[in-house]
Image (cartoon, rainbow, N blue to C red):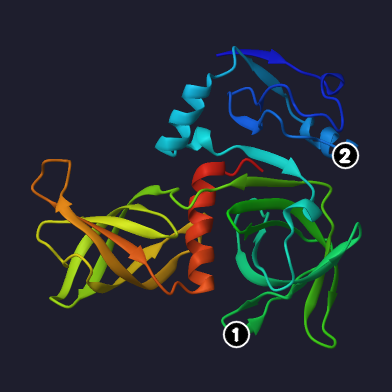
Amino acid sequence: MTLIPLTEKDIHLGHPLPWDLVDRDGQVLMEQSCIIDDQPVLEQLFKSDVFRAAPEPSAAEDKQAEEEDTPAAHAMQISTLASVQLAPGDMVQLQTLHTTHTERYQVKMLGFHAPVSILVTSPTAQGKLVFIKEGQQFLVRGFVGKDAVAYKTRVLKSNLSPFPYLHLAYPESVQSMRIRASARVPVELVTSVVAPRGRGAAKIVDLSWGGARMVSPQPVADKDDDVTLAFRINPSGLDVYLTIKGKVRAVSQDDSNKGLVATGVEFVDLHEKDRLYLTNMVYQNLLKDNL
């Protein structure tokens, strides 16, 4: 792919982009026809090198990427917090930015006062309030519908009254990515399976927040069975044990020709926290921690 370097003068505020904006590795930053209508967003975008691809991918190639659900089909965009519409009650993750160790906490959005601060509940660990210093920096990650969002911030104020909450600095820009429901992560996770035929074990080979595909030497369930899966995941270094209910949608011989049985499971009645863990795992796989 031939890359043509761009400058801020090549982008006209309020006008649709005539081509995809990409980084030096050819990864799409903003898609063609997107509109940048804010000068700070434009300046944030050009803090690193920005290019356009020549020639542009054909419509057929774009369609193929979408059908195959490859990372190239998920374009990262830079926008404002207001445009992604994080709302009070949404769960987000605070990730510390220490160089030696990283901590992650699940907190709830309480509201925001643009362009000053965002209000979130104070993080807890094992039922106890975590001490947070004013000025401490965090990477915030969350999900709005099918969009994964991330932005850097710092603690402006920590309050204990009338309940523990934090004021976080309002971000100048937010990274977002549309993740389709079919987006899946290749994994190798051992899971226990509780099904009407009894308890068994299998290996999950791809995973999304909507379901999983697993393989096993012998069938562990039949089509349309209600099952319970129990397995560990490690989203962004956080060790999480999940117990998830599902319904078997397909049972077949695995394509690997190793004599294994492939079982497709759709997750049902997924708890909000479990969905957040699973979507965060998909998110980190697609964005590769670009922030």
**Residue 10 sits above or below residue 65 on the image:** above
Q: Residues within 10 Å of mark 2 (few under 14, many from 20)?
A: few
Q: Is residue 197 left or right of residue 156?
A: left
Q: How many marks?
A: 2
Q: Residues within 10 Å of mark 1 (few under 14, many from 20)?
A: few
Question: Label for residue 248?
Answer: none
Q: Residue at x 72, y 51 (%)?
A: 151
Tag 2–tag 1 contact (CB < 8 Å): no
Decide if residue 288 is in sight here: no
Give the secondary structure at mark 1.
loop
Q: Residue at x 86, y 33 (%)?
A: 14
Q: Residue at x 48, y 74 (%)?
A: 271
Q: Is residue 52 left or right of residue 68?
A: right
| Snapshot quadrant of residue 159 | bottom right
Q: Position of residue 3 (x, y in %)?
A: 64, 14
**Residue 100 sits above or below residue 21 on the image:** below
Q: Position of residue 133 (x, y in %)?
A: 79, 68
Between the residue at mark 2 and the residue at mark 1, the CA separation in whole angstroms equals 42 Å
Inspect the image, locate mark 1, and give the three-letter code of the amino acid beneath it.
Answer: Gly
Inspect the image, locate mark 2, and give the three-letter code of the amino acid beneath it.
Answer: Asp
Looking at marks 2 and 1 on the same chain, the residue that comes earlier in the sequence is marked by 2
Give the secondary structure at mark 2.
loop
**Residue 29 sits above or below residue 105 on the image:** above
Q: Mark 1 highlights which residue? A: 127
Q: Position of residue 248 (x, y in %)?
A: 25, 65
Question: Label for residue 38?
Answer: 2
Which quarter of the figure is the C terminus placed in?
top right
